[in-house]
Amino acid sequence: MTKAFDVRRPAILILGAPGAGKGTQGKILGSIPRFFHCACGDVFRSLDTRTAIGRRFVEYSSRGELVPDELTIELWKAQVENWAESHVYKADIDFLVLDGIPRNVAQAEMIADFLDVHQVFHLTCPDRTELSRRMRKRALKENRMDDASETVIHHRIETYEAETRPILDHYPDEIITVVDAMRPPVEVLSDVIRSIIHLPAYREMAKEVP
């Protein structure tokens, strides 16, 4: 059976600080035919801890340690291949919509051999008060009280600025689209879709797939 990564697969990356709306936009795009939303959280939630790779993940998480980048990408690749083999993700015709991965430049370099990133959407929300409000609201809605604390929220934003935001310098400027995420989600979505439908890769896919 052909593996998902025998050739580089088309992908779209959604980048932004916690609370900027990456998950919202990713889920909406993933509901559209020929787009598959791949959130980092979904990968770990789908992990079979009975497998060898799953047990390696548990070794770190049970000690409260960060999972190394190499293992994170290995887990991610394995899960995407599982999705491809079960035809949930159609590797030959679907765009992968990445949300929450890569988390840093090292991970972006590791996935370069497997994915062809056609567009990076940078959801900007410079108002940290608004980011905090959104994160607190989501945490309370999902009954994750610990994540609603100002200390946790501040740490997550600082981690993004230090580790994840530099990914923008890894990709060429011509594939980066800056989107104002301070606006309502439907307006953000409109900008994202407008950009996607002008991508040469999307236009080629649209010709081949009804």
Image (tube, grey):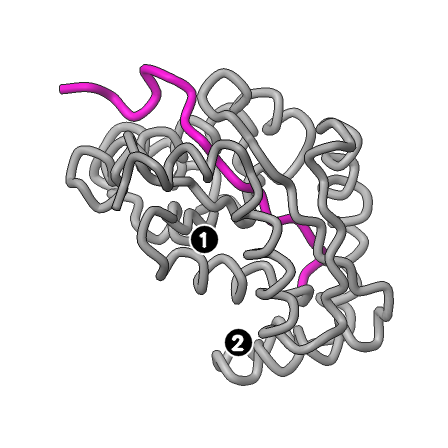
- The residue under label 1 is 41
Q: Which mark is residue 72?
A: none
Amino acid type of the residue tagged 2 in the rendering = Arg
Query: Which is more toward the observer, 28 or 103?
Result: 28
Residue 151, image x, y percentages: 77, 68
- The residue under label 2 is 144
Residue 16 in the magenta stretch? The answer is yes
Assess whether mark 2 and mark 1 are in contact (beta carbons under 8 angstroms): no
Residue 204, image x, y percentages: 42, 32
Please determine whether, in this image, residue 85 is positioned above or below residue 40: above
Residue 171, image x, y percentages: 71, 28
Please determine whether, in this image, residue 102 is positioned above or below residue 88: above
Q: Residue at x 30, y 44 (%)?
A: 47
State the image quarter where residue 30 is shown.
bottom left
Secondary structure category for the residue under label 1: helix
Q: Residues within 10 Å of mark 1 (few under 14, many from 20)?
A: few
Secondary structure category for the residue under label 2: loop
Q: Residue at x 76, y 51 (%)?
A: 178
> Taking 30 as reference, is 152 left or right?
right
Q: Quadrant of the N terminus?
A: top left
State the image quarter where residue 5 is shown.
top left
Query: Which is more toward the observer, 199 or 149?
Result: 199
> Taking 150 as reference, is 62 left or right?
left
Task: Give the foreground label among 1 and 2.
Answer: 1
Residue 109, image x, y percentages: 61, 21
Magenta segment boundaries in residue numbering: 1-18
Query: Which is more toward the observer, 24 or 73?
Result: 24
